[in-house]
Image: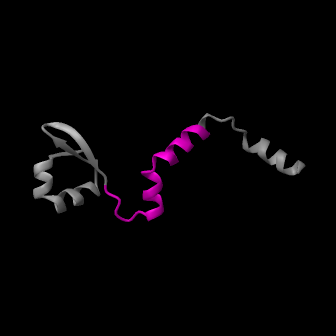
């Protein structure tokens, strides 16, 4: 993972964006992590929006806490209905 300062990012935006396509780039301010640059080239807009939407991840965390059933149980339920 590459680390660059805000000042270096300003001077080398294109190179940092190119690098972010291969691995995350940590942006530092005064030597401390401030942001992460993540490459998304080739991804669908919908995927990018969902991956960065806090409400989507809140929904996922909530769903993961709910009870689940096995595939066999689902098939049995569907055969009944």
Q: Taking 74 as reference, is 12 left or right?
A: left
Q: Residue at x 69, y 35 (%)?
A: 67
Q: Residue at x 61, y 40 (%)?
A: 63
List x then y, in percent, for residue 28.
18, 42
**Residue lying furthest right:** 80
Q: Is residue 59 above or below residue 10?
A: above
Magenta segment: does it hold 54?
yes
Image quadrant assignment for residue 69: top right
Residue 24, visible in the rendered structure: no
Residue occupying the point 16% across, 41% down: 29
Q: Write the residue at 80% across / 48% down.
A: 75
Q: In terms of secondary structure, what is the magenta stretch mainly?
A: helix
Q: Which span of residues is magenta-colored?
A: 39-63
User: Which quarter of the figure is the N terminus placed in?
Assistant: top left
- Asked whether, in this view, residue 65 is left or right of residue 31, the answer is right
Asked where in the image residue 68 lies, by quadrant, the reply is top right
Q: Indicate the quadrant where residue 64 lies.
A: top right
49 left or right of 66? left
Residue 76 in percent (x, y) is at 84, 45
Q: Is residue 59 visible?
A: yes
């Amino acid at each position: 993972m590459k680390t660059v300062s805000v000042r270096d990012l300003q001077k080398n935006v294109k190179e940092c964006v190119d690098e972010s396509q291969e691995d995350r780039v940590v942006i530092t301010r005064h030597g401390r992590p401030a942001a992460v640059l993540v490459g998304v080239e080739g991804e669908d807009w919908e995927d990018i929006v969902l991956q960065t939407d806090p409400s989507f991840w809140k929904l996922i965390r909530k769903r993961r806490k709910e009870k689940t059933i096995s595939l066999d149980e689902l098939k049995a339920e569907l055969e009944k209905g």
